[in-house]
Image (tube, grey):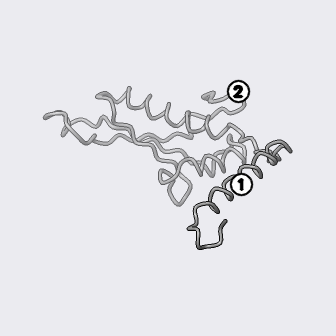
Amino acid sequence: MIQVTPEIAIDDGELIESFIRASGPGGQNVNKVETAVQLRFDVRRSPNLPEDVRRRLEKLAGRRLTKDGVLVITAQRHRTQDRNRDDARQRLFELIRAAAIRPVKRRPTRPTKASRVRRAEGKKRRGTIKKLRGSPGDGAM
């Protein structure tokens, strides 16, 4: 079990890793060695995720989530498999940690009486200024 947050631990068997060839520069070695890691985690079928965390994780994953509910993370930043594997796992754990944070609902506030009075006075002042802009024949004065 891998401890992600104090409440959430994920079984190592739930993570499926496959190795693919990394794109980009790397010389002749890039065509021979499969250093990039594709990490798959089934969000919908994971027994270790609470339902609210699962819903938020699906929203956070965006297009990295397949139609079947599998989160796919591809890591190819580093030149070795081990470092890419660690990178992919850390990115998955960061997503889960972000999904575990419960959003705080906004409490609507009301303007104070003084701010309402200031707003009304400002509106009156602006209205007066606009009235004075008219030409003398408009009857503004």
Residue reaching furthest left? 28
Q: Nearer the viewer, residue 68 or 54?
A: 54
Q: Label 2: few (<14), some or many (≥20) within 10 Å?
A: few
Q: Which residue is mark 1?
A: 123
User: Which residue type does callout 1 highlight?
Assistant: Lys
Marker count (numbered): 2
Considering every residue shown, the one lying at the far bottom of the view is: 138
Q: Residue at x 33, y 37 (%)?
A: 36
Above or below, 44 relative to 82: below
Q: Residue at x 61, y 37 (%)?
A: 98
Q: Nearer the viewer, residue 53 or 34?
A: 53
Residue 50 location (% of width, % of height) = 72, 43
114 sits left or right of 21 in the view: right
Numbered circle sitting on residue 11? none
Asked if labels 1 and 2 touch by Cβ distance under 8 angstroms, the answer is no
- Name the quarter where the C terminus is drawn: bottom right
First reached walking from the N terminus: tag 2 or tag 1: 2
Residue 122 image point, x, y percent: 71, 49
Mark 1: secondary structure: helix
Amino acid under label 2? Pro
**In terms of depth relative to the viewer, which is nearer, 24 or 112?**
112
Q: Residue at x 28, y 37 (%)?
A: 34
Q: Is residue 131 found left or right of 39 in the rendered image?
A: right
**Disc number at residue 6?**
2
Quarter where residue 101 is shown: top right
Q: Secondary structure under badge 2?
A: loop
Residue found 56% across the figure and 55% down from its top: 69
Calculate the distance from the C-alpha at mark 2 to the C-alpha at mark 1: 54 Å
Q: Is residue 2 left or right of residue 112?
A: left
Q: Position of residue 108 (x, y in %)?
A: 80, 47
Q: Where's residue 49, x and y in %?
A: 68, 42
**Residue 103: quarter of image:** top right
